[in-house]
Image (tube, rainbow, N blue to C red):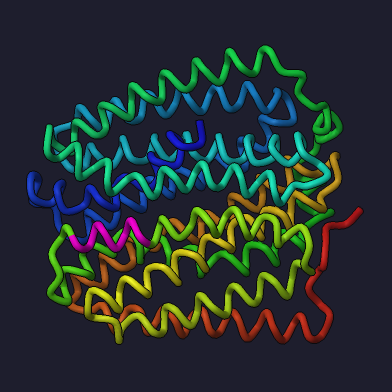
Amino acid sequence: MVFVINLARVVFAPLIEPIRATTGATDATLGLLATMAWAGSALPRLPTGVLLTRISRAKAIFGSGIVLTLGTTVAALVVEPRHLLVGAFVMGLASGVYLTAANTLVSELFPSRPGRALGGHGVAAQLAAVGAPALVSFVLVVGTWRTALQWMAVAAAVMTVVFTLVARRVDLPEAGTEDRDLLGAARAQWHIIATSVATIGVAGMTWNGLFNFYVTYATSVGLTAGQGRTLLLVAFGAGIPAFYVSGRVADRLPSVPYLLTILTAFTGCVLALPSMTEFWSLAAFSVVVGYVIHSLFPAIDTYLLGSLPDRHRGSAYATYGAGMMLFQAPGSALIGTLLDRGVAFPTIFRWLGFALLAVLLALVALHLDDRLPRAAEA
């Protein structure tokens, strides 16, 4: 299920150039297209948190599958780029509902080893990200970018049915039955929520813009679009072992130092990117940046979901998800707008790197002053 859900969030990265070729859309429009999927993923996080105080995680996941099927169908049928934005937004809505409900459910299914379970769930999601460039390349041989979205609509419908049939045969945990006050949970856990959003917010925004325009950046330094898609595949591929390893490491190491170490490595990657212009240097960069950024996601989820009490888990995680995604979503639109205004890629990446450095230094200072929470409130 998460394979199909995450594919909807990342599929527009390898589709940007084919969509540009057939519609004549500008960089700003294409950046907004990717942003709409992520903005859609941000919008339902809080409402889903409220919804989870009333219905089961499984029912919310079923609803996300229905929404994804509708969104991909709309995106596959539209004619004008601005209508495609609507389909991307609806596809994003599905991922927001799913990830809020499913990550919470996964942590409750495996309370003794949440990092390992969330890492495994992340591996399945990352397989979609890795497969997206290859799948798009294959589809473009036998069809168009619309064909890719049509196949996704069918896959979403099938997996929704499969998930529902499996869920009916499983005894699901009742850990969230006391979670009935979203605002109360947010107030009680605001320290760890704010720390998590600060850690991943600018990093997520930077990564969102970077991977969606990675193929475009590759072509700007003289590589082909095919080479760019290969580099994107390598970056996402490095995320598979990252999810697997990082989830297990997060169960064992102190959370805050581990998170700050990952953020330091990612900041260094972004600052180094403008000096990478050859295929093999970018290939090495792709391995490193892909591993580093994807290590951050299970580490953050383990930090939160592994320590939140049952009575706050779903609501607090939904609040975090809303805040985190609102930071991440503008990444592609920001880069696309700056490119349309004549700002070069190296300058954009340096600006983003300095923003990350400022956040990192602030978090390190707070940690040294013992002002960052090590876990949620009991």
Position of residue 3 measured from the top left corner of the image (x, y, whole percent)? 46, 37
Q: Is residue 87 magenta?
A: no
Q: Nearer the viewer, residue 365 or 13?
A: 13
Q: Residue at x 19, y 31 (%)?
A: 147
Foreground residue among 210 and 344: 210
Per the rendered image, the range of residues in magenta is 227-234
Is the residue 35 above or below the residue 4 in the image? Answer: below
Q: Position of residue 241 (x, y in %)?
A: 53, 57
The x, y position of residue 91, in whole percent, is 39, 36
Which residue is found at the position 73% from the left and 41% from the top? 107
- Drawn side of residue 134 relative to residue 142, left or right: right
Residue 72 sits in quarter: top left
Side (left or right) of 264 relative to 254: left
Q: Is residue 72 placed above or below 99 in the rendered structure?
A: above
Dominant secondary structure, magenta: helix
Q: Quadrant of residue 256?
A: bottom right
Residue that extends furthest to the right in the rendered view of this protein: 378
Q: Residue at x 21, y 42 (%)?
A: 82
Q: Residue at x 24, y 34 (%)?
A: 148
Q: Is residue 270 left or right of residue 176?
A: left
- In depth, the one of 73 and 189 nearer the eye is 73
Where does residue 109 sit, x and y in percent of width and height? 75, 34
Number of numbered markers: 0
Q: Is residue 206 visible?
A: no
The relative height of residue 377 versus residue 275 in the rendered view (above or below) is above
Residue 63 visible in the displayed image: yes
